[in-house]
Image: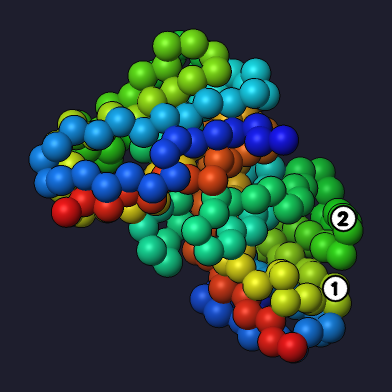
Amino acid sequence: GESVGLHLPTLSVQEGDNSIINCAYSNSASDYFIWYKQESGKGPQFIIDIRSNMDKRQGQRVTVLLNKTVKHLSLQIAATQPGDSAVYFCAENTRIAGTALIFGKGTTLSVSS
Amino acid sequence: DAMVIQNPRYQVTQFGKPVTLSCSQTLNHNVMYWYQQKSSQAPKLLFHYYDKDFNNEADTPDNFQSRRPNTSFCFLDIRSPGLGDAAMYLCATSRDTSQNTQYFGPGTRLTVL
């Protein structure tokens, strides 16, 4: 598996496996985090978000984990499907009005049947 | 139902010929953003409007301008497109700027000949 804070630009998994995509954020003042999925030729699509007062949040087949101590965010996808193949971006934001959403480097997830 | 709409989806222009990209939203959000995204990179924020207040990013070239005539519409004007401006241009909206999810449109793919 990936080390904390290590960003991998690509991740290849088999259909049915669980996927873990990691993201290290930089701003200690960031208190809101979002994961986006971007398929080829399309705009980013919201997957799940988490606020800094939480360390885990679950959605349908997805779980986001937040470790503020090491400024690390992860997205777990259960039972990965070919339709999950895309580029995944994490993004961070603060409660300071007017600050921009900061995108991390994307991870390309490839799911093979 | 489409919430953030971008037109056209594909735009071809000539070097130096002005071009305008369009974005509209049905979410009645206060904030509208324009991003530039080049291949294999994260979206890069160009500027955003909070209502009628324009907020330019420090490193956005003067060649890029924007207009927001009303809540629903926002335009990106590229006054003299260069070859380096070929990219995907993404429009996004959010209710507010802090701790708010941004919803993206499908993007406009700009080609400069």
Q: Residue at position x 87%, y 65% from top? A: A61
Give the percent coordinates (x, y) of residue A111: 69, 81
Kindly indicate whether the residues beneath marks 1 and 2 are on one polypeptide chain: yes
Is residue B102 visible in the rendered image? The answer is: no
Disc 1 to disc 2, C-alpha distance? 10 Å
Q: Residue at position x 12%, y 46% from top? A: B15
Q: Is residue B13 left or right of residue A30?
A: left
User: What residue does disc 2 label?
Assistant: A59
- Chain where mark 1 sits: A
In what quadrant of the picture does the N terminus of chain B appear? Answer: top right
In what quadrant of the picture does the C terminus of chain B appear? Answer: bottom left
Q: Residues within 10 Å of mark 1 (few under 14, many from 20)?
A: some
Q: Is residue A52 left or right of residue B104?
A: right
Quarter of the image holding residue B13?
Answer: top left
User: What residue does disc 1 label?
Assistant: A78
Give the percent coordinates (x, y) of residue B68: 42, 17
Q: Residue at position x 69%, y 87% from top? A: A112
Is residue A51 placed above or below B100 in the rendered structure? below
The image's mark for residue B54 is: none
Is residue A76 placed above or below A102 in the rendered structure? below
Q: Is residue A55 left or right of residue B78?
A: right
* Type of amino acid under label 2: Gly
* Type of amino acid under label 1: Ala
Label 1: which secondary element: loop
Give the percent coordinates (x, y) of residue A79: 85, 77
- Chain where mark 2 sits: A
Which of the two residues, A108 or A3, is positioned nearer the viewer here? A108
Give the percent coordinates (x, y) of residue B74: 44, 23
Q: Residue at position x 66%, y 36% from top? A: B2
Is residue A34 placed above or below A99 in the rendered structure? below
Quarter of the image holding residue A53?
Answer: top right
